[in-house]
Image: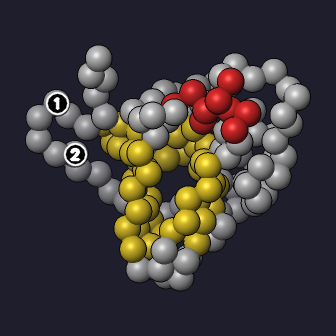
Amino acid sequence: MSRTTLTAVQLPGTGGASGSLAAPDATNGNIVASPGPFKALVIVTNTGSAASLYVRASGYQGSASGAANASYVTSQYQPFATASTGDLTVALAASETTVVDLDRDTGRFTQADGSMWLDWSTASGLTVMVVQRLYMP
């Protein structure tokens, strides 16, 4: 199956960003098209029980339902060396909003086509928004 696309909200230079929260796809996973994790914030609201978000490392070859690093081949060519660190697993506490800032290590999560892959332990009670901030050198 193909991943379900999440469209990133662009953060303007002044003022706030408005966008809608989307339901994540725990069966097929989600994809954020290029530029993927570059300057991205992933905002997850959880109204249900505890869950996990997996931000897949570059080169991930498994299914969306795979556990963290379940199908990561460490000997394969890696366009970004930090990808060998593997997936990022984020605990999503019950009845909490979690913000994941991917500003520091974007190369680790950039797939070959420039996208970012997000997988979920469950989609029950979760909504997500991806915000891309402006590039500020």
Indicate the position of residue 105 as horizontal and vertical percent values: 51, 33
Helix, strand or loop status at disc 2? loop
Q: Quick one: SS at disc 1?
A: loop
Res. 60 image quadrant: top right
Answer with the quarter of the image where residue 101 lies: top left
Viewer can see residue 33: no
Q: Are the residues flagged by discs 1 and 2 in contact, CB closer than 8 Å?
A: no
Q: Is residue 57 left or right of residue 41?
A: right
Residue nearest the observer in this picture, 31 or 77: 77
The C terminus lies in which quarter of the figure? top left
Question: Neighbour class for label 1 at 10 Å: few (<14), some, many (≥20)?
Answer: few
Residue located beneath label 2 in the image: 17
In the figure, 68 relative to 83: above or below? below
* Residue in the picture at 25% in, 37% down: 11
Amino acid residing under circle 1: Gly
Left or right: 125, with 96 as reference point: right
61 versus 48 height, above or below: above
Would you name the residue on which mark 1 appears?
13
Q: Quadrant of residue 12?
A: top left
Instruction: Indicate the amino acid at tag 2.
Output: Ala
Choose between 66 and 32: the one closer to the eye: 66
Residue at image position (48%, 27%) is 35
- Residue 29, percent from left and from top: 65, 53
Q: Image point 78% across, 57% down: which residue?
A: 66
